[in-house]
Image (spheres, rainbow, N blue to C red):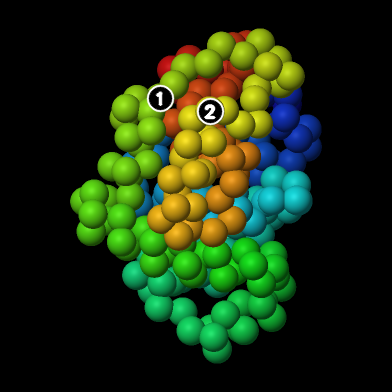
Amino acid sequence: MTDNKKRCEWVDGGNELYYDYHDNEWGVPVHDDQMLFEFLTLEAAQAGLSWATVLNKREGYRKAFDNFEIETVAQYDEKKIAQLLDNPEIIRNKLKVNATVINAGRIIEMQKEFGSFDAFIWSFVDGKTLQNECKSLSDVPSSTALSDAMSKDLKKRGFKFIGTTICYAFMQATGMVNDHTVDCFCYEKCS
């Protein structure tokens, strides 16, 4: 891409998926439970891998997991899980696949308790995006006291593959925190 826009340092030069994700999704507030579930699943899938790997498999995830229909995924049985573990279009890690199914069930429980997963998860930031003023990638944390609290609460409620680093990446992706660097053209857009 040669548009000369200043972007966050982590954006992979030459990967159009990265540009599109960074420019149009990362840091933009998400309040739809199905999209929140998708981001939670993708952030967990990334654990130990590169974000490029996950982005390259995103469409495969959408197909494999019924477009992240929470009620459908929560009903997956052992046969369906075995099919997923044979699917080369996703990251075939048994713990991560099982976590996705379990987490769908936990989201349904939270929808009943709080009205939506969105209402619960955004309560960690009082419903407003936290505005950081990072000057460079080195200023961007990988976890915070807030992501520690989120991880602890979600684990207590039975969620899986939901450590503090995953929670913080989820917060960044869904716009709960604006970690675009101040010189990035998306910083103001996400403020």
Whether residue 88 is visible here, answered yes or no, is yes
- Residue closer to the observer: 41 or 61: 41
Whether residue 63 is visible here, answered yes or no, is no
Identify the image quadrant of residue 94: bottom right
User: How busy is the neighbourhood of tag 1: few (under 14 within 10 Å), some, or many (20 plus)?
Assistant: many
Question: Looking at the image, is 162 positioned above or below residue 29?
Answer: below
Question: Which residue corresponds to the image point at 47% horizontal and 17% vertical from the top-left?
Answer: 131
The N terminus lies in which quarter of the figure? top right
Question: Which residue corresponds to the image point at 62% horizontal and 14% vertical from the top-left?
Answer: 134
What SS does tag 2 mark? Answer: helix
Number of callouts: 2
What SS does tag 1 mark? Answer: loop
Question: Looking at the image, is 107 positioned above or below residue 25?
Answer: below
Give the distance between the C-alpha atoms of the residues marked 1 and 2, in whole angstroms. 16 Å
Pinpoint residue 92: horizontal percent, then vertical percent.
Answer: 70, 70
Amino acid at pointer 1: Thr
Question: Which residue corresponds to the image point at 49% horizontal and 52% vertical from the top-left?
Answer: 155
Amino acid at pointer 2: Ala
Pinpoint residue 173: horizontal percent, then vertical percent.
Answer: 53, 38
Rendered image: mark on residue 145:
2
Q: Is residue 10 left or right of residue 147?
A: right
User: How busy is the neighbourhood of tag 2: few (under 14 within 10 Å), some, or many (20 plus)?
Assistant: few
Q: Is residue 111 left or right of residue 139?
A: left
Pinpoint residue 11: horizontal percent, then vertical percent.
Answer: 71, 31
Question: Which residue corresponds to the image point at 67% horizontal and 39% vertical from the top-left?
Answer: 18
Q: Earlier in the sequence, mark 1 or mark 2?
A: 1
Give the residue number, with chain letter if any, for mark 1: 129
The C terminus lies in which quarter of the figure? top left
Pinpoint residue 189: horizontal percent, then vertical percent.
Answer: 46, 20
Identify the image quadrant of residue 45: bottom right
